[in-house]
Image (cartoon, rainbow, N blue to C red):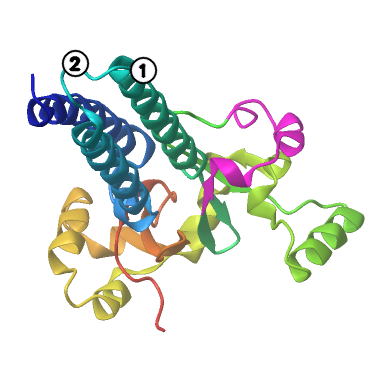
Amino acid sequence: MNRYQASFTHFLISLAIAGLVYVTVRYLWYPGPLFEIAGGLELLLIVISVDVTLGPLVTMIVFKPGKPGLRFDLTVIGILQVAALAYGIYSIAESRPVFITFVKDRFELVRAGELDDADLAQAAYGFADPPWFGYRFAGAKIPRDPKEQLKLMDSAIVGGKDIHLIPRWYVEYSVVAPDAAKQAEPIAKLRKLNPDGKAAIDEVVARSKGSEDAVGFLPMRAGKRDMTVVVTKSSGDIVALLPLRPWEY
């Protein structure tokens, strides 16, 4: 085997591993439009480009049949590549969406790395362990205790944690769904904000038996750019997440 064959073999192995990582990230950690909008695509491209290119390239440089210490060199390359891949996967996992939380008049995308273990320990059943695959809808209820309300206000003012990052205030989405229904804006407005989104909007409306009056939309802050959450006007049930602009500015 010459250096080019060794490098190509290394490339194929790296490509297979990259494929497994892609499937995990694309379909389990950043499903649907979140893959692009929440930054999953960018992070994955960085990890895969490093894994698929640098390892095989270094192998081509150092490989020489019969070279003393060749096995050691290849072992070091493999260890470094696995370490880089592991760090990249860890970074992607920390940034993965785990909750989509309704707060007052909007939804907030919450990532795994934004939640503190101490806050999770105080969360209600079902919210103490962020899901590893996919995300979960939740609601955040402002506490009735004036002291707790003041704490939240102070934290938000100084740039600390807002309520959507404190799982102890999470409740099942069904509890706040009626509030979401009341706050939902008409689909006609969403059409005006997104003249190029007609097909996606029509598809969602079709799920509601063709009646635009049956659904409304709310904004969702998602990081890279904001998204739209479509809900039923009667109950606030989630209909779809759309990569459409929810704001007038």
The residue lying at 60 percent from left, 61 percent from top is 104
Q: Picture coordinates of residue 65 (x, y %)?
A: 15, 19
The residue lying at 30 percent from left, 72 percent from top is 190
- Badge 1 is on which residue? 72
**Quadrant in the rendering for residue 112:** top right
Mark identifier at residue 2 = none
Query: In the rendered image, which quarter contains the N terminus?
Result: top left
Q: Nearer the viewer, residue 212 or 202?
A: 202
Query: In the rendered image, which quarter contains the C terminus?
Result: bottom left
Q: Nearer the viewer, residue 128 or 140?
A: 128
Horizontally, residue 177 falls left or right of residue 14, namely right
Residue 92 lies in the magenta stretch: no
Amino acid type shown at disc 1? Phe
The residue lying at 15 percent from left, 30 percent from top is 7
Real-space CA distance between mark 2 and mark 1, rounded to the nearest whole angstrom:
13 Å
Considering only vertical position in the picture, is 90 above or below 76? below
Q: Picture coordinates of residue 163 (x, y %)?
A: 69, 54
- Badge 2 is on which residue? 66
Considering only vertical position in the picture, is 127 above or below 138? above
Q: Which residues are magenta?
A: 109-129
Amino acid type shown at disc 2? Gly
